[in-house]
Amino acid sequence: MTALEHDYAVTAVLDDNPGYKGSVHEDSVARAQGFRAALIPGAFVYDYATRLATRAWGVEWLARGAIAARFRRPVYDGDELVVKATPAGTFEGGPKVDVTITNAEGEQVLVGWMALADSPPSVPAVEALAFHPFATPKPELRVEDLAHGLEFGTEDRVLTAQDIADSRTAMGNTEAIYDDGLAHSACMVRLTMRDVLTSYKFPLAPVFTEVETRNCAPLKAGRRIQTAAQILDVFESNGRHYFKSEEYLVADGTEIVARHIRTNLIAG
């Protein structure tokens, strides 16, 4: 990274997606749950961090890059943030940086690292993955139903240029690298997350708290996408219940483009 790319400022802005209604991304709901205003989705904050990766490493980061990010505090609509990267050695033969996002009060809202490996990660053969259409009606999932190996469903559809444009607009992502229909990393995270959340009726909407991403190949509009996902781990911390999901995003039924290991808070 050049010195100019070691940090930058960004204003967190919440879009007006009607899908936020009834969630903590709606102001009235967030305030009723003790927050001071509507929360910015974790995928937006993740996107702010990954802009540094693509500025430094370009499309190669989408082919063989990695990021681990943990969301430490809520981010609110209008928050002024600073994204900062500092050298942190190497990762699988390539450069690695620590990354933080800090709010105006000096609190870290995201911590983690990003790297550019020398080669794409080893992943299972697509034929070894399981793809399931969504069940109708949607099954109810209780906390006690969470278990290692529980599988999620997937939509089977073509990713359009409009899908990517809408995602960029929502997150305020104007990075030129994506102008030709290339999907940004946060768009891919949301695609697999949406399939997981659509698979069941959860007791409460899961809260995205942490993610590890391995990029395997760039993804462009026009490709058919599916998610193969299952629970890797279930645990409790401070009286709260979490599950960790492994989510593979697959293009055209032949190529894994990303692997996400995502931690979700499911209930207090």
Image (cartoon, grey):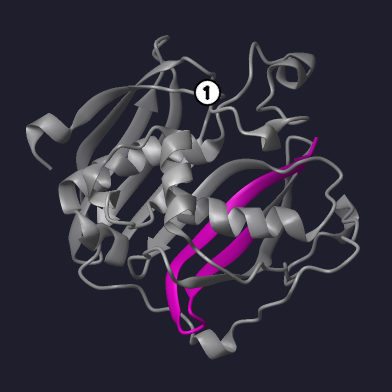
Q: Is residue 165 above or below residue 30?
A: below
Tag 1 residue: 75
| Disc 1 residue crowd, few under 14, some 14–19, many 20+, Cα 10 Å | many
Q: Residue at x 30, y 37 (%)?
A: 174
- Chief SS of the magenta region: strand
Residue found farthest to the left: 2
Q: In the picture provided, is 164 more to the left or to the right than 203?
A: left
Q: In the picture provided, is 145 more to the left or to the right than 52?
A: right
Residue 20 or residue 244, whichever sits in front: 20
Image position, residue 82 (x, y; %): 32, 22
Q: Residue at x 69, y 37 (%)?
A: 19
| Residue bounds of the magenta highlight | 245-268
Give SS at disc 1. Answer: loop
Residue 45 or residue 6, whichever sits in front: 45
Q: Residue at x 57, y 24 (%)?
A: 74
The kind of residue on which mark 1 rests is: Val
Image position, residue 117 (x, y; %): 24, 64
Specify whether residue 263 is painted magenta: yes
Q: Is residue 51 above or below residue 109?
A: below
